Amino acid sequence: MNKQNYSGSSFLNDPEEMLSFYARGAFPMADSNGVVDWYFPKIRTIIPLGNYNFPRSLRKIIPSMNFEIKFDTDFKSVVYACADREETWISEEIIQAYFRLQKLGHIHTVETWKENKLVGGLYGVTFRGAFFGESMFSLVPQASKFALIKLLEHLNEKNFSLLDVQFLTEHLRMFGAKEINLDEYRKLLQESYFKDCTF
């Protein structure tokens, strides 16, 4: 993973500046001491929106879970739930920067609800036809997976062309996530900028 030599604090304070870094494919992460740096990996991970996978096991169990999906109703709860773990890169400084970015309409949530309680979800940053996935959480089994499937469906409906998920995990691989090189990524990034999508 390549760490760009940028001061996190100075760029996080300006939401327009922060968005410009996302638009270039960079993203912020805080270390265990809360120090923020911006990262730009040479190997990128995406889920192809035109060729994602809906796991058969998940397809079978979802109807019995009685989940309800909502968009953009409780960003604060989603981001704090994502940060609530032993080790997290989502520092309070980054969270406050997200709130400023949210006011510009570039942060969005996909929320899984059950019996009127938020039980899972995810959030990410949007810029034109690109969605930069940041983090997800789950308080009950399958809740974050359900949110991810609904995100994939939603992005296709809204004509987005890029879903950047930062790093490959087994959890993401089951949905069709794959690693691509920087040249491929930059091409997809450029294509997404010719679109003017609304989440």
Image (cartoon, rainbow, N blue to C red):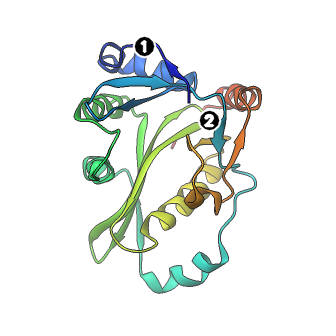
- Image spot of residue 131 (x, y percent): 55, 40
Query: Mark 2 falls on what kind of element?
Result: loop
Q: In the depicted view, which residue is nearer to us: 39 or 70?
A: 39
- Image spot of residue 143 (x, y percent): 43, 69
- Image spot of residue 177 (x, y percent): 66, 52
The residue type indicated by label 1 comes to Tyr
Tag nearer the camera, 2 or 1: 1
Number of other residues with Cα within 10 Å of mark 1, as a class: few under 14, some 14 to 19, many 20 or more:
few
Above or below — where is 24 with respect to 78?
A: above
Q: In the depicted view, which residue is nearer to us: 27 or 127?
A: 27
| Residue name at image x 65 percent, y 71 percent | 55
- Image quarter hosting the N terminus: top right
Which residue is labeled 2 in the image?
A: 129
Which residue is labeled 1 in the image?
A: 6
The answer to whether 23 appears left or right of 77 in the picture is right
Image quadrant where residue 9 sits: top left
The residue type indicated by label 2 comes to Gly
Return the disc, 2 or 1, that comes first in the chain's sequence: 1
Image quadrant where residue 65 sits: bottom left
Query: Mark 1 falls on what kind of element?
Result: loop
Q: In the depicted view, which residue is nearer to us: 6 or 153?
A: 6
**Residue 144's disc number:** none
- Image spot of residue 44 (x, y percent): 65, 36
The answer to whether residue 110 shows anywhere in this view is: no
The number of callouts visible is 2
Above or below — where is 117 with respect to 57?
A: above
